[in-house]
Amino acid sequence: MLGLAAEFEFEAFVRLAGDAAAAPSIQERQVIARSAVRALEREERLVERITALGGDPAEAMAPFDGVVQDFEERTTAGSWSERLLKAFIGYAVADDFLRLLAEGTDPETRELVAGLLGDEAHTELVVAQLSQVLADDVAASRLALWGRRLVGDALAVIQGTIVRHPAFGRLLAAAGPGESEDRVQRVFAALTAEHTRRMERLGLTA
Amino acid sequence: MLGLAAEFEFEAFVRLAGDAAAAPSIQERQVIARSAVRALEREERLVERITALGGDPAEAMAPFDGVVQDFEERTTAGSWSERLLKAFIGYAVADDFLRLLAEGTDPETRELVAGLLGDEAHTELVVAQLSQVLADDVAASRLALWGRRLVGDALAVIQGTIVRHPAFGRLLAAAGPGESEDRVQRVFAALTAEHTRRMERLGLTA
């Protein structure tokens, strides 16, 4: 779990640095570049935790190489708004998934992950930027459609990750009552519900 | 000058984040990612200074959009060693040039720039990594050749920048005695001398 989280944060750092370069204004560029730095800082904390638990960070992260790329390649964002929404939805769903996985780990790891995840500054930028775009009904319905595609892609990447790493299924099962498969299904229901809540915050239909 | 420096550091941040993603080991990846963060921090300091002087950072930086890309596109690094040497030489020559430009500015800006530039941790990584590669004579002579191409590219980008922005020629002239053109020539001689010193540190013929 820590390997996945660390690899995810590192790749988020690289992607966000690229997003910053493509930002249309210097203000957005600075905010997104800072988000990239925070992702790297989270990765560093996670790498420290892997080491503290006696693990080898490189070994722990290697199986998840390309996890963000997998999501990035599924759908190509056209406009800047689409790119913003893509990063926002992708990282938020991943955060939620990591938090759910962490519930099955030791208390210290769980607390670390819960404390690390979430990036309010980035969320606020996205909400502020997109609210301007969403004043236009056509743009809003196009973005709502885009959001639905994105969450589908994000959930598919997560499902693929669980299938390739059965230990995640066990971690999710350990975190709650009921049958293991039910628990995995409940996880997807929880991820979808969180996504719906976020889209509503943006004023978009999920 | 501050606009050029800030844009340069921002683009260095983006490039180094990409370099980190391509690093062959997790140790190198972490060191390079941290170099990227330091480049962004330098950019933030420079942006602050532009604002403190009453300038508009976006306006100050816009003329230099793509300055690192210009250098990057001239020659494509093949191996990881070539990529390391490319970043090392490119950023070092740029740092030297910015430092020389800063000599023609107000004392506070000059001090800020002198204090900001240079990244010892990054240099040490490059020196340590390349020394291993350079134990092999064939690799060493290939990298020496590569270094000569790179410095040529870096100086060409700087020359292009001076031609497009005559104010830089004036800044360089302000910083020393003699005719303006002589001074610009002396700058290139100084940049070449610094490059030779750095290549020698690596054990390479400049």
Image (cartoon, coloured by chain):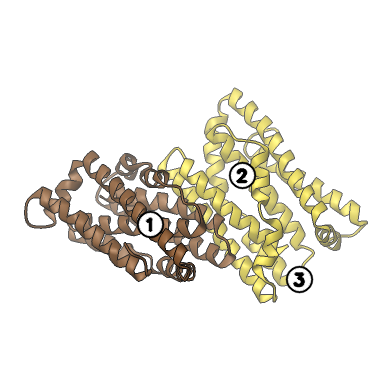
Chain colours: A yellow, B brown
* B112 vs A186: above or below: below
Which chain does the residue under circle 2 lie in? A
Q: Is residue A138 left or right of residue A159?
A: left
> Alpha carbon of mark 2 to alpha carbon of mark 3: how far?
28 Å
Q: Is residue A66 left or right of residue A101?
A: left
Residue B187 percent coordinates (x, y): 19, 55
Which chain does the residue under circle 3 lie in? A
* B27 vs B13: above or below: below
Rendered residue at 54%/31% (across/down): A133
Q: Give the residue furthest to the right.
A: A179
The mark found on residue B164 in the picture is: none
Q: Give the residue furthest to the front.
A: B138
- Per the image, the residue denoted by label 2 is A88
| Label 1 residue SS | helix
Which chain does the residue under circle 1 lie in? B
Q: Nearer the viewer, residue B163 or A155?
A: B163
Q: Nearer the viewer, residue B90 or B99?
A: B90
To the question of a shared chain for discs 3 and 1, the answer is no
| Label 2 residue SS | helix
- Per the image, the residue denoted by label 1 is B145
Badge 2 amino acid: Phe
Badge 1 amino acid: Leu
Quarter residue B95 falls in:
bottom left
Mark 1 is surrounded, within 10 Å at the Cα level, by few (under 14), some (14 to 19) or many (20 or more) other residues, namely some
User: Does the residue at mark 3 contact the one at mark 1 (Cβ under 8 Å)?
Assistant: no
Rendered residue at 56%/68% (across/down): B27
- Per the image, the residue denoted by label 3 is A106
